[in-house]
Image (cartoon, grey):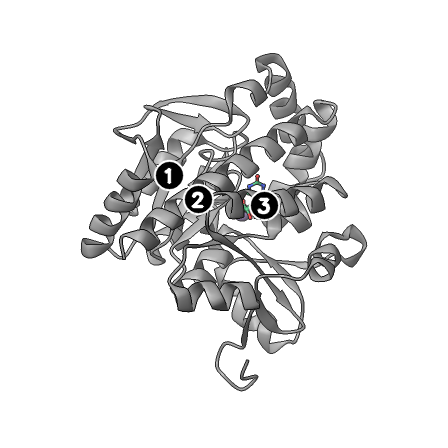
Amino acid sequence: MDPLAPLPVALADEVADARSAGRGVVALETTIVAHGLPHPVNLEVAAACEVAVRAAGAVPATIAVVDGVVRVGLAPEELAALADPARGVAKLSARDVGVCVASGGDGATTVAGTIAVAAALGIDVMATGGLGGVHRGASETYDESADLVALSRYPVCVVASGVKSILDVGATLERLDTLGVPVVGYRTGRFPGFYRRDAGFALEWSLGGPAQVARAFRAHRALSPTGLVLAHPIPEADELDEGLHRAGLAAAEAAVARDAVTGKAVTPVMLAAFAGATGGASVAANRALVVANAGLAGEVARALAERR
Ligand code: PSU
Ligand code: MN
């Protein structure tokens, strides 16, 4: 790592080896670890995602900023430090990474921050739980996740269980359309709603296997600079009960209104309120879906590497 390079990056050995061997690599975010899930489930989920990527025949690259260096592939101690709520590490969207590096700080990357780094390094697949999107009431607050604009800028295939169901799903789909980001169902014609398999919207496109996704993404990249959303519903057995989901949503909205939460804190506060109102059932669902997404991302990364 050259500390004077514009972007100081340290690749884990495993990631560096995979890159030189042309093996598939999957970028994994860390905001879900630092801000999205409670301790210590967050740490278990991060480890389980890495296991799922490896089981699919690809190499995980979990991304964060540590001491002002972009780390691609984290050691277990580094992951544990990020997962420790007492540390309160920064949440880094794409716009924050450079400034965090210059300040020598630590931070966990969102989908936007992670795909910005991944694109700079030529990593073309990432997995997350649910994308950020347009918040309910955005016509007043203008609160729209930078994940959407990032997807329009960085050519990364993002595997996600749709967008978080705390959002305005219809508005988010409209924005992805405007931004030129394809949304493809994986073995489904319905757009998933994070904890639920169907958020109530039909998808125009659906693909049935990793090789088809790899072909679609390569063809898309040949004519567009944007990423692609591969919408992968939560496994049926792990879906959150509809009544619990409704209760969780109500609690999430109430928490934000009660404490007048704004900015980066909105999504973490909503997820925590959701977990409280569902007695932790939403956390179990979140774990199941993100691990499944990591596995599928591994399969897609492997298919992309094989076709190279
Ligand atoms: N998926 C999850 N949990 C999360 C996130 C995704 O299952 O916490 C994170 C991702 O890092 C995503 C972020 O980019 O939530 C969106 O935050 P915001 O709405 O502030 O853009
Ligand atoms: Mn926001």
User: Looking at the rendered structure, which numbered label has been put on residue 81?
Assistant: none
Amino acid type indicated by mark 3: Val
Mark 1 neighbour density, 10 Å: few (under 14) some (14–19) many (20 or more): many
Amino acid type indicated by mark 1: Leu
Indicate the quadrant containing the N terminus: top left, top right, bottom left or bottom right.
bottom right
Q: Which residue is drawn at 65% across and 19% down?
A: 247
Q: Residue furthest top?
A: 243
Among numbered discs 3 and 1, the one appearing first in the sequence: 3
Q: Where is residue 287 in the image (x, y as percent from the top left)?
A: 62, 34
Indicate the quadrant containing the C terminus: top left, top right, bottom left or bottom right.
bottom left
Viewer-nearest of discs 3 and 1? 3
Q: Residue at x 70, y 32 (%)?
A: 273
Q: Quadrant of residue 172?
A: top left
Q: Name the residue under label 1.
A: 230
Q: Does the residue labelled 2 lie within 8 Å of ligand 1?
A: no
Q: Position of residue 93 (x, y in %)?
A: 53, 57
Q: Name the residue under label 3.
A: 51
Closer to the camera, 252 or 117?
Answer: 117
Closer to the camera, 60 or 140?
Answer: 60
Among numbered discs 2 and 1, the one appearing first in the sequence: 1
Among numbered discs 3 and 2, the one appearing first in the sequence: 3
Left or right side of 271 for 26? left
Q: Residue furthest right?
A: 86
Q: Which residue is drawn at 55% across and 26% down?
A: 195
Q: Mark 2 points at which residue?
A: 297
Q: How many marks?
A: 3
Left or right side of 174 for 120? right
Viewer-nearest of discs 2 and 1? 2
Q: How far apart are marks 2 and 1 (CA)?
A: 9 Å
Q: Residue at x 41, y 46 (%)?
A: 158
Regarding residue 180, the answer to whether it shows in the image is: no
